[in-house]
């Protein structure tokens, strides 16, 4: 079965699955917003992923990811909460696509789905980082990660 056909045939099941998985994560802002908000947002993302695959055009999903980042950042969502929403939808799609696709179509389907989600999540993260660089956001303070990197440079010089 072709990827677009699979996605159309399993849309409701995928969205139900993603909504349930996101609810189980008990992410503060999504719980506060409620299941209707969450389902509507997953539906929007789903439709844009499917459209990007059908039309081989990611411009709309990039614009959506940018807008979501700005909206969620302003509402106080942590970037990880929004990334989780993207990830649960992607996982739910994979659970339907992999068993439904013919072996000859699977490589292309994997490439398309991975590319669209990768681009969307990259756009989301880049916009969050841009917004965070204008504000002090502790969840994006990576300085502790790089503590001691000067000693690593010296250690690399000692390797023959």
Image: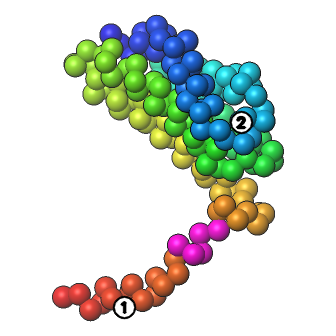
Question: Which residue is depicted at the point 67% across and 22% down?
Answer: 39
Classify the position of the C terminus by image quarter.
bottom left
Residue most extreme to the right: 75
Q: Residue 142 in magenta?
A: yes
**What residue is disc 1 on?**
154
Q: Nearer the viewer, residue 101 or 119?
A: 101
* 154 sits left or right of 72 in the view: left
Q: Count residues near mark 2 (Cα–Cα under 10 Å), then give few for <14, some for 14-19, many for 20+.
A: some
Q: Nearer the viewer, residue 128 or 60?
A: 128
Q: Position of residue 80 (x, y in %)?
A: 61, 49
Q: Nearer the viewer, residue 57 or 107?
A: 107
Q: Position of residue 25 (x, y in %)?
A: 59, 38
Q: Closer to us: mark 2 or mark 1? A: 2
**What residue is disc 2 on?**
30
Q: Which residues are magenta?
A: 141-145
Label annotation for residue 89: none
Q: Is residue 43 above or below residue 133?
A: above
């Amino acid at each position: 079965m072709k990827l677009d056909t699979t996605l159309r045939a399993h849309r409701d099941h995928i969205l139900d699955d993603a909504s349930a998985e996101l609810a189980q994560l008990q992410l503060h802002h999504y719980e506060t917003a409620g299941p209707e908000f969450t389902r509507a947002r997953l539906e929007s993302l789903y439709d844009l992923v499917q459209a990007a695959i059908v039309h081989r055009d990611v411009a709309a999903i990039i614009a959506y990811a940018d807008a979501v980042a700005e909206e969620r950042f302003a509402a106080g969502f942590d970037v990880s909460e929004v990334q989780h929403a993207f990830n649960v939808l992607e996982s739910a799609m994979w659970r339907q696509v992999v068993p439904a696709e013919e072996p000859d179509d699977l490589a292309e389907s994997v490439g398309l789905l991975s590319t669209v989600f990768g681009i969307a999540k990259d756009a989301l993260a880049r916009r969050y980082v841009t917004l965070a660089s204008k504000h002090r956001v502790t969840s994006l303070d990576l300085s502790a990660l790089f503590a001691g990197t000067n000693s690593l440079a010296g250690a690399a010089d000692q390797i023959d």
